Image (cartoon, rainbow, N blue to C red):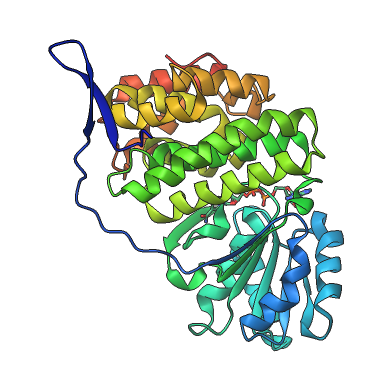
Amino acid sequence: MRTVNMTQITAGDGSLVTRVRPLNAFTYSSAAARVVFGPGSLEHLEREIALLGARRALVLCTPEQTGIATAVLQRLGERGAGLFAKAAMHVPIEVAREARAEALRLGADCAVAVGGGSTIGLGKAIALEAPPGALPVLAIPTTYAGSEMTPIYGITEGGIKKTGKDERVLPRTVIYDAQLTLSLPVGLSMTSGLNAIAHSAEGLYARDSNPIMALLAEEGIRALAAALPLVQARPDDIEARSQAQYGAWLCGTVLGNVGMALHHKLCHTLGGSFNLPHAETHAIVLPHALAYNAAAVPQAMAALRRALGCDDPAQALFELGQRLGVPAGLAALGMPAEGIDRAVDIALQNAYWNPRPLEKAALHNLLSRAHAGLAPA
Ligand code: NAD
């Protein structure tokens, strides 16, 4: 079998010779999250809370997901301390403070975050301030954003989102139950899935990547790219939903383990400075960021070609986005055309490492095309 670390070359006599690609030295550390996977796996919640040694779990959700979170609280019985249903995008510090106070008031010893990246982010914000191990997070993700697999947190104060990394915020247990994703609207399912693909795509060329992450990234992209069109056609297809969740898990793991580059920097800039929606912004920018980096990262492009079954990954992801109904461009998300210059300037400040040097004119071109909804250059 050909693996990602094998390459075939043509010998002088025209025959194909398989060579092992040299491995770079790397450091690999495995995060300790326990994963319980499968449709219906929410039934194991009480067991998982008991395994964490918790007795009083505070359930977190957004106001829109109060229904499912209440069902989770009821399932917890005596181990349920209460419900905090005010999670909001980008974790406003006021909400985080209120949730911490509620956890303290109820004597909670665990947070159960039911929802997407916003709710899981709130769980992380609570865990960050608690004494080490005092408030573990059990995450029940209902989108494909992948936050449950990362030690990355973000908190917004005075309109500025500060992010950081701390092992204390990494959820200790994750329950992936695809039943809970059936209600995720088709549009958000598509953009959320492309957001996950972006984690793995950039993970493939991360400076600190390693062969394990490369395997996870390629498999995560393959699973999501295959599942999303099926979910679009039949949002209640539990097999396709499960496959998408599997891909999201792998892509989230990649995000949590290796550094991100231009694509994530651009999306953070656009989200933070123009208040653009998270998943949609990722879905629009990804093909353009990949086209920008393509020539500098041949191995990553080869992995993307295998995962997507195509010749030109940037173009294929652009076309996939079009088929999946991704908004036509950043303009359609409400970004003003005058903002492009400012976005380029911000992206050049405190720039992340990127395999291709950041060039002002080329970045301007990239964002102009993404703004207008054009194909990647
Ligand atoms: P989200 O959590 O903001 O959810 C979007 C909306 O969808 C909310 O109204 C939510 O209630 C609703 N929703 C979620 N799941 C649903 C379901 N199954 N059925 C019906 N409605 C549902 O969206 P997101 O894209 O998951 O998360 C975005 C946020 O997460 C951003 O702030 C982003 O920065 C953060 N994030 C953080 C990390 C990390 O590693 N720290 C990773 C990815 C995303």
Q: Quadrant of the C terminus?
A: top left
- Farthest left residue? 12
Looking at the image, which residue is at 38% across and 43% down? Answer: 214
Q: Establish if 278 lies above or below 170.
A: above
Can residue 269 be seen from the camera position used here?
Answer: no
**Residue 130, quarter of the rendered image:** bottom right
**Residue 363, quarter of the rendered image:** top left
Can residue 316 be seen from the camera position used here?
Answer: yes
Decide which of 11, 168 is in the foreground and name it.
11
Looking at the image, which residue is at 62% across and 61% down? Answer: 120
Q: Is residue 84 left or right of residue 146?
A: right
On the image, the x and y values in percent for residue 362 come to: 33, 20
Decide which of 161, 225 is in the foreground and name it.
225
Q: Establish if 375 lies above or below 275.
A: above
Query: Total number of numbered labels?
Result: 0
On the image, the x and y values in percent for residue 165 come to: 42, 63
Looking at the image, which residue is at 48% across and 53% down? Answer: 253
Decide which of 371, 72 is in the foreground and name it.
72
Looking at the image, which residue is at 73% across and 72% down? Answer: 45
Q: Is residue 83 left or right of residue 118?
A: right
On the image, the x and y values in percent for residue 302 come to: 36, 27
Q: Quadrant of the N terminus?
A: top left
Decide which of 72, 376 is in the foreground and name it.
72
On the image, the x and y values in percent for residue 264 come to: 44, 41
Q: Establish if 51 lies above or below 223.
A: below
**Residue 346, quarter of the rendered image:** top left
Q: Is residue 153 left or right of residue 52?
A: left
